[in-house]
Amino acid sequence: MENLPVEVIGNILSRLGAARDVVIASATCRKWREACRRHLQTLSFSSDDWPVYRDLTTSRLEILITQTIFQTTGLQGLYIFMDDVDEFSAATVIAWLMYTRETLRQLIYNVRTTPNVNILDICGRQKLEILVLAHNSITGVEPNYQRFPCLKSLSLSYVSISALDLNMLLSACPKIENLALANPEIAMSDAQVTVELNSLTLKNIYVEAISLDKFILEADSLETLHLKDCALELFELVGKGTLKHFKIDDVSVIHLDIGEAVENLEIVDISNFTIIWSKFYQMISKSSKLRRLRLWDVVFDDEDEIVDLETIALCFPQLSHLALSYDLRDGLLHYGLQGSSHLENVVLLELGWTVFNNLFTHWVSDLLERCPNLKKLVIHGLVSEAKTHEECQMLANFTSSIVQLMRKYMHVDVHFEYE
């Protein structure tokens, strides 16, 4: 260890992450203290790392963080997660940011302050590449002044911001590729809540827990779109057909439009969602490159609609991962097995149920016959705590039937996942 260059020691200390561990390790000797002071790249202050943080007064915590930060000279990553702290002093936070802003590449900040600190003012025009903000408010964005020339990833959680400022902030980041919005408080002057975002460089967007009338996203380079736990009247994606990964989880939307140019779609993952299958299928039917299709806990707007496996096999010839949840309502199976076409490239099959009955085994058997090159089968099940004798017997019969069925498919790896 004595022969290690001081820069290497600094790199080792940077990988510890937690500030408390860094401080303890740097007490080893003079050389390690020098490495901490001159070559430490990352510091993390998190109440999850050290429970004692929660027992300290806010002023004492501010002093500890200040002393630790000011003993470094070139921090590239600063992470501060203090969920149980009421509010930090704005003056103290500004001192941290002013001291580190010229070298910072990553800033993850989840602390309330009094008054609110304008982090955009302090860190704009610097070298920041990743910015994660939570429990803050952003007002009056000036793209020319608060510019982030190097920022590639932006995450806002529980942040208060207007629709106009959000779009302005995006335009202030000419290299942004990743955007995450979780439970934002969108301030609107009009009665109708509309968000319009425009970016030429954005590749991935994740939106969670947002309620809007209209959400219009114009992104010519977008590859991944993930909507979760949202309530929208209209969602529209305007782009040039670069979308590869489309995921919806527990979303309520009346009008959904991801554009006509979807020939590059490779993954479609839909769960806890109500759809009109004919319209949705029409939207993705040209996606001949589709490799993964997941339809889980999907409710059909028209009870007579059927997802035809024959059509899936013909329209998505490259499909290698198929996941379907069994749904039988009023005697109608929504995932029909009409036709005789095989899913030649499917190697992973995930099947599950929400309401279990004896027909599930036959459905699994028929699907296995359609997948001649299958390598892995995963069966998901929902098992309630209290079960009648009849339900227990049904589950036992199903287990026996699957064991017997899989003797016919010895080459297939079988897994069961019950909730």
Image: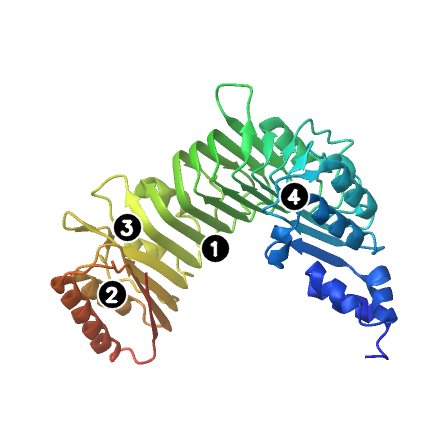
Say what secondary structure mark 2 lies in. Answer: helix
Q: CA distance from mark 1 to mark 3?
A: 19 Å
- Disc nearer the start of the sequence (3/2): 3
Of the image marks 3 and 4, the number of the one nearer the N terminus: 4
SS state under label 4: loop
Mark carried by residue 364? 2
Viewer-side label of 2, 1: 2
**For marks 4 and 1 on the same chain, the one whose residue lies earlier in the sequence:** 4
| Tag shown at residue 266 | 1
Give, as a three-letter code, the residue at label 1.
Glu
- Residue 52: image tag: none
The first of marks 2 and 4 along the sequence is 4
The secondary structure type at the circle numbered 1 is loop
Residue at mark 4 to residue at mark 1: CA–CA distance: 20 Å
- Assign a secondary structure to mark 3: strand
Three-letter amino acid code of the residue under disc 2:
Val
